[in-house]
Image: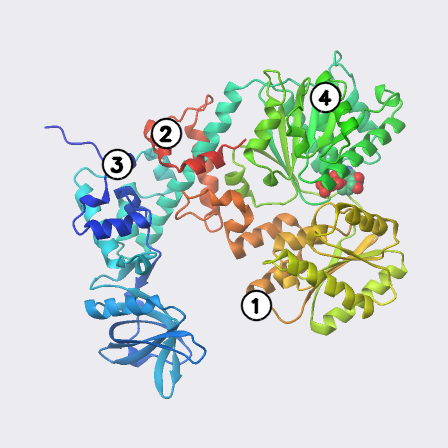
Amino acid sequence: MTSDPPLTLLDLSDMGVDRLSGVGSAKLEALNKVGIESLLDLLTWYPRRYLDRTRQASIAELFAGEEALVLCRVSSVDTRRTRQRRVMVTAELSDQTGSLRVTFFNQPWRARQLERICDDDVEVAVFGKVEVFRGRRQMTNPVIDPVGDRTGRIVPIYPQSEVAGLGTWEFADWTAQVLRRSSARGIADPLPDAVRSRLGLVGRHTALTDIHHPSDAHDVRAARDRLVFDELLRIQLVLVRHQRELSHNSSGFVHSVGAPDAVVPGLIDGFLTGLPYELTPAQRRVIDEILGDLAKAVPMHRLLQGDVGAGKTVVALVAMLAAVEGGHQAALMAPTEVLAEQHAAGMQDLLSGASRRDDSTLLGERPVEVALLTGRTPAAARRRILAGLSSGEIPLVVGTHALIADGVEFDSLGVVVVDEQHRFGVEQRAALRVASPEDAVPDVLVMTATPIPRTAAMTVYGDLDLSVLDELPPGRTPIVTTWGVGEEGEDSAWAAVREEVAEGHRVYVVCPLVEESAKLEVASAEATFERLASGPLAGLELGLLHGRMSADDKRHVVDSFRRGAVEVLVATTVVEVGVDVPEATVMIVLDADRFGIAQLHQLRGRVGRGRAASRCFLLTTAEPGAEATARLEALVRTQDGFELAEVDLDLRGEGTVMGDRQRGRSDLRLASLRRDREWVVRAREVAMELVDEQGRIEVAELADELRLLDATDEAFLTKS
Ligand code: ADP
Ligand code: MG
């Protein structure tokens, strides 16, 4: 008799939880409701945390003011309404040493939960701060977990159990059943032994057993490491496979720079010679990386990260000129009209300046023209530009979504630059690619000014190569950042405003963020404007800028600010992107504790763009909470966007760093890009080893497992 092979994750995902004893139709329905259908779903429904019984106290030992964990039983439950009409559920709990009252406000469902626990007469673990009220010990809104009559030192607590009507002890039972029943065949471990032992990981069967039924904290850690690694490896395998498949299967343009037979020979050389400044070493390195990619037939997929002011524009332009030098076209797509206009103007300036200074090449005679195509382009100009793009006469175009509208065709689109890509959808980038009729796939450079930590980049943009401009051009004076509290803080900020305006400089005042409502935010901006104009900044020329103004009004006030007719621009966060006024030297953010790190960093980046020293005042009305304090202190301490991104990841977790894209990442059940940074790096290394040049995963069982990834995950991961 041959024994059955070990169970794979796919086998487990084909077996329903209805086969477990204790799962009848009611439980099945409850399980399905939280998304658990298969045995695999159950096994990957990991404990939310663990109770360490060695650390529990008895009720008699509780001290007021301390946080404590007690195990006890529920003896009675009572529900009533307070005078403020709030629902108040109280319960009496007891152990052998005494009794404790717990009170929950505004959680009416607690009554049912506690009554059930009372009826079942099972133990609950209660964790909270001990208070003494009229001589009695009590806790308000404690964490309460049914434990059941389980023994063992470490008791797993499962998520959501109380809400769905699924006991946490039931989960423990069911997972034990699955593991017991699979122990004959064992759960397969597709990870090559060499990799497993090199990384010091436990086997998969052990990991799944110990995550649910550990005998000590060490078991939990080892199990977690293994399961975290598996999650991250699956993601990296998808990314690396996609990247290698693309390289292997698609053919792109070969843009070789400096070739004697180029259509516009010497274009890039001439451009670089004509630049008014020396490139920074970082710019030179990144340009080399890009030109290296462009010279290969494999289409480029590269992410250019660089802080605000790092000098991405010139790098992007060089990439675009590489296409033009070889007789092809290049397009830059920006997320807003303002940004598109600025890119077009900035690039045109660079080109005209270079052509004036460089008399040795074609540039001298006729600078390459940059066309601008946005939703605002007048019909006649649009017709002219579309004709120029399809004939190939227009080599460079900058625009918004208008670039991918119907009717836009290129003669030979060789390089595409996408600015701030997270604002675009996958489909839009793909659309720009097919707008080119040739078989060759354009090279793509994605630019982002929002630094994200390396391990996050490896996951979110893991199928892109990464270039980082990690150095600012010389001559920038650091922005002196201070955090001021209350009136005193404001007073010193307004004094600085008057000094700087007297010097001919300009000032931004960013109004309190009102997240819930754009309308309230505008009202708050208007109120701030009135208050400053008639109070602390009376006598200065103030302008108001917010998102609900018409485009013309916005442009008008920004122009006045640029010219100096407006000295102080009172604005909502609309100034976050796009407004570029070198004479602005002061940034004041009101209620700065309401903003996130990235946003404050972007706002601060509006100043410090000229030669003069700049200042940033982060003002709060009162001492904020611990997390906001940590954010503000980080901004005061450093101006390095990457360092700030790491702090942000530490403080708030990955969801915020990645915004929308993170939402599709449902396969990360245990892994955290924050806590598990080193595992991200290791998983990527292993994925690179296990995927061959053609994008084949060398271990078939691992490749099979990728079928388990959520479809949305796949779409997210392989977006480019
Ligand atoms: P980013 O797009 O990365 O925010 P920009 O490309 O707009 O930055 O550049 C910011 C400013 O720095 C621009 O005024 C640009 O002219 C200038 N700049 C860029 N590279 C250099 C350099 N190597 N030396 C001096 N100034 C530079
Ligand atoms: Mg820029």
Residue 474 visible? The answer is yes
Where ligand 1 lies, by image quadrant? Answer: top right
Q: Nearer the viewer, mark 3 or mark 2?
A: 3
Pointers 4 and 2 in contact (C-beta within 8 Å): no
**Residue 539 image-quadrant placement:** bottom right
Q: How are the colours assigned in the image?
A: rainbow
For the point 39% across and 41% down, the residue is 231
- The CA span between labels 4 and 2 is 43 Å
Badge 3 amino acid: Asp
Upstream in the sequence, badge 4 or badge 2? 4
For the C terminus, the quadrant is top right
Q: Considering the numbered disc 4 on the image, is that residue within a helix, a strand or a loop? A: helix
- The CA span between labels 2 and 1 is 47 Å
Q: Position of residue 697 (x, y in %)?
A: 40, 27
- The CA span between labels 3 and 1 is 48 Å
Q: Residues within 10 Å of mark 2 (few under 14, many from 20)?
A: some
Mark drawn on residue 703: 2
- The CA span between labels 3 and 2 is 17 Å
Q: Which residue is mark 3?
A: 14
Q: Nearer the viewer, residue 398 or 406?
A: 406
Q: Position of residue 691 (x, y in %)?
A: 43, 27
Q: Which residue is mark 4?
A: 389
- The CA span between labels 4 and 3 is 53 Å
Q: Considering the numbered disc 2 on the image, is that residue within a helix, a strand or a loop? A: helix
Upstream in the sequence, badge 4 or badge 3? 3
Upstream in the sequence, badge 2 or badge 1? 1
Residue 633 visible? The answer is no
Q: Is mark 1 within 8 Å of ligand 1?
A: no
Badge 2 amino acid: Ala
